[in-house]
Amino acid sequence: QVQLVESGGGLVQAGGSLRLSCAASGRTFSYYAMGWFRQAPGKEREFVAAISRLGGSSLLTDSVKGRFTISRDNAKNTVYLQMSSLKPEDTAVYYCAAKKWGAVETSTDRYDDWGQGTQVTVSS
């Protein structure tokens, strides 16, 4: 099991930027593919981005392509989500998740461990 703690959320105006961080502890970080998901009020949790164990491949959902970037630093046991050109519809609680071994995935049920989430609010 790996423990995950997100940070970096907050209130930002539309068009602004935020960088989310997710610090991992408890197991060898490079064993895990990492994902970012988000959940808006009244909606299901949805996939945002994922990155492979060594950072060689990544996936982004269509709605954030060109605006968000996922990266990781295995020496710091941290995965990042750089968010730019934020829109009000990006408002949600953002969660990071860890998936041991295997390829990156977009489904929530493929991930083994989850953080507590960080709120991102984008005002219009």
Image (tube, helix red, strand yellow):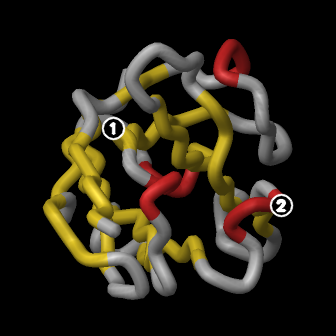
Residue at image mark 1: 93
Q: Please tell me whether mark 1 sits on a helix, a strand or a loop.
A: strand
Reading the image, the residue beneath label 2 is: 62
Q: Residues within 10 Å of mark 2 (few under 14, many from 20)?
A: few
Residue depicted at 17% across the width and 57% down the height: 7
Q: Amino acid at mark 2?
A: Asp
Quadrant occupied by the N terminus: top left
- Quadrant in the rendering for residue 65: bottom right
* Nearer to us in this view, 63 or 108: 63
Above or below residue 56? Residue 62 is above
Which of the 4 quarters of the picture holds residue 82? bottom left
Q: Could you tell whether 62 is left or right of 64 in the image?
A: right
Q: Position of residue 24 (x, y in %)?
A: 29, 48
**Relative vertical location of residue 36 with respect to residue 20 in this rendering, above or below:** above
Crowding at mark 1 (Cα within 10 Å: few <14, some 14-19, many 20+): some
Q: Which label sits on residue 58?
A: none
Q: Is residue 107 left or right of residue 44?
A: right
Give 3 or 39, whichever is nearer the viewer. 39
Q: Report how far apart the C-alphas of labels 1 and 2 lie in the structure.
A: 19 Å
What's the amino acid at mark 1? Val
Task: Pick whichever of labels 1 and 2 is earlier in the sequence.
Answer: 2
